Image: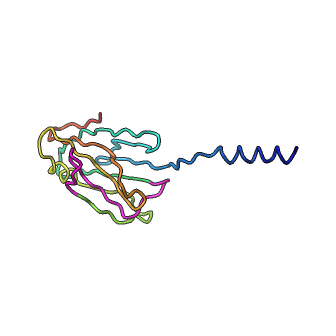
Amino acid sequence: MMVKSLLVIFCVGLFSFSNNRGGDSFEIWLNGKMMLQQFVHVSSSVQTLHLNAASANDKLDIYYRHCGQAGTNRYITVKDEGDRSLKVWKFADSNGNNPAMSIKLKDISGLKKSKDSKLNIVYSSSELPKGKVLATLDVSKETSVAMK
């Protein structure tokens, strides 16, 4: 009877763990101000960031963490609404030093084909080879910054 009870407790304990591995998260910062923070397995929706290239020095910093660690062989790709790659940036492995992937906003705004076109920011790495759309960017030349 005791052995059966221990076996049941062991089986219940074994199956109580989820198969879903988690912990991936990302943040997008504009000039040191956090614009978006998302935990990948909690929310799968893609947010639209309305950004305005007010200064030539405006900079996006993107942080993507795989279970708390920066990825290896990291890329940020800007794609148009038709999923065509417009520009790709490759980033060195951070080795714990600086996990930020920095891009000048003017480099992104120059990729827009029309006033109403939207651009997708896609992250990929050795840990996430198929890539993940982090956000849709709507970049204009006005003077305010907002998030939808």
Residue 85 is inside the magenta segment = yes
User: x and y percent of residue 7 in the render?
Assistant: 78, 47
The reply, left or right, for residue 5 in relation to residue 42 is right
Q: Which residues are magenta?
A: 66-87
Outermost residue on the left side: it is 114
Q: Vertical placement of 117 versus 77: above or below?
A: above
The reply, left or right, for residue 120 in relation to residue 18 is left
Q: Residue 90 or 20: which is nearer the viewer?
A: 20
The reply, left or right, for residue 97 in relation to residue 9 is left
Q: How is the image coloured?
A: rainbow
User: x and y percent of residue 82 in the render?
Assistant: 21, 46
Outermost residue on the top side: it is 148
Residue 121 is inside the magenta segment = no
The reply, left or right, for residue 126 in relation to residue 108 is right
User: x and y percent of residue 115 in the render?
Assistant: 12, 39
User: x and y percent of residue 37 in the render?
Assistant: 39, 43
Residue under the point 33% across and 57% down: 101
Residue under the point 15% across and 38% down: 116
Outermost residue on the right side: it is 1
Q: Quadrant of the C terminus?
A: top left
Q: Say how many tags the image has.
A: 0
Q: Quadrant of the N terminus?
A: top right
Residue under the point 34% across and 52% down: 62
